[in-house]
Image (cartoon, rainbow, N blue to C red):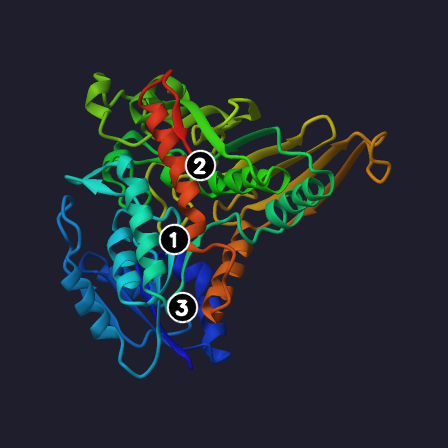
Amino acid sequence: MSAQLVVVGFDEIVAHKYMPCIAAAINAGYLSSYSIIDLESERGVIAARLREVPLAPRHIYYLPNPSPAQDLPEGRIREAFARVTDPSGPIRAYIATEVKAHESYLRFCVENRIDSLVEKPVIAPLQGGRFAPTLITPTMTALIGAARRRTGSRHSVMTLSRYHRVYNDRVLAGIADRVSAWRSPVTSLHLRCAGGVWNRQEEYETREDHPYKHGYGMMLHGAYHYIDLVVQALRINRVALPSTRFRFQVAAFAASPADQHLRIPATAAAQIADSIDRWPDSRTAARFGETDVTAIFRLIDADSGRTLTVGTLAFEQTTPSVRNWTEFPAGTYNKNGRTSAVDFEVGLSTVFSSHVHCYDIPRGDPDKIDAFARITTRANAALHPGESYVATEEHHGVFHSDSNRALMSEWLRGTETRSLLADHLLPMQVTEAILAAAVTPGVTATIDDF
């Protein structure tokens, strides 16, 4: 039976990236219609956005804006769903709100057996209106437990690194095949994600999309895609060492919006009218989320204490950008000039490594950026004659949105299995651990039973 789709949060990503998937699912009979739930403050923006898409929603319902320190009451969510759906068929909910609202909608879907797809990261628990990372693990555990008890619905998470034709289909698949064949564990992992995000200082105080003012930042924005990738790579160790109990340990450092005036040259900042130090007393900016994080980690055998995997992680946004404008350009999605570069290397001790360098290639229009990837593998071909000592392959036109659309299409068909809610407990725990380590420099955070 065709399902009714409820889009909770009709932002630019939904309009530009996912409407073709929704239209295809309706044409194929997987969906009967789609409807929208959003906030009253977005009414005008959504009306304008809908004029640019070819498929009109069946219903739209606008909720009153909650206060910053208030969760949306369950009764309001129930009323909203009742207004845009009917008992004629199953319901699927795509949760694309700002991350601080994810938890309320996801809990409603879990408790009411409504299939859901929630945008990454899964949740950003708040306490008194402020991000409380120590609540990530208990909240995730409770949601996953409730989903297991309430059978009859499925819950997935939208992220980049589950259907990616380079990261998943080439790099991780190649590592998994060799670990399985050689029983050689993953012994090193290094990742650097350079986001190229350039916000003016005042934008940290005012932005509603990808905000920093609630106490979370880069780690819950672009970094989560790659934390998910890292966890998938480390989990391959379970193939080589299935009976080993693993423990993850990490130490980290972070930079914040308060550091930006020191880090960006005055001549460059002046080009976007941002050369004045907005927070001379850095304590006034402590309320903001992080902009850049770097970490070192190891994975150990919890019983013997022996080290299995060592590695480094860097999630940075203060890296080369294409921004040269002061105010956000009207009609532009890439408002802060984001252009990314990713380095990811996975090593299997003395026998093999795979390294991918994937980077954006700006073409002038900030919304039309191509991407390129080069994979370099190195192997001990003396031990494994079927391997090459060094091999390279190139991939052009690597549009990361293709992997997101693939996940969306699978979920709309009811066949998504690679990115289920339970699969994201460890990535969210790693996010929590890195944040905990970053606020206590020099202190190691630990995840048992990794």
Q: Residues within 10 Å of mark 1 (few under 14, many from 20)?
A: some
Type of the residue with mark 1 = Glu
Type of the residue with mark 2 = Asp
Disc 3 marks which residue? 53
Can you tell which mark lies on residue 449? 2
Tell me the CA gap for discs 2 and 3.
46 Å
Tell me the CA gap for discs 1 and 3.
21 Å
Pointers 1 and 3 in contact (C-beta within 8 Å): no
Tell me the CA gap for discs 1 and 2.
26 Å
x, y percent for residue 358: 60, 39
x, y percent for residue 369: 54, 46
Would residue 410 appear left or right of 332 to someone viewing this image?
right
Would residue 438 appear left or right of 164 to someone viewing this image?
left
Would residue 326 appear left or right of 350 to someone viewing this image?
left
Q: What is the tally of numbered marks visible in this picture?
A: 3
Q: Nearer the viewer, mark 2 or mark 3?
A: 2
Quadrant in the rendering for residue 105: bottom left
x, y percent for residue 278: 24, 23
Disc 1 marks which residue? 119
Q: Nearer the viewer, mark 1 or mark 3?
A: 1
User: Tag 2 or tag 1, which sits nearer the N-term?
Assistant: 1
Which residue is more in the foreground, 68 or 386?
386
Quadrant in the rendering for residue 26: bottom left
Q: Identify the residue at horizontal 85%, vertical 40% (top origin).
A: 386
Label 2 secondary element = loop
Type of the residue with mark 3 = Val
Quadrant in the rendering for residue 108: bottom left
Q: Identify the residue at horizontal 33%, vertical 47% (top origin).
A: 141
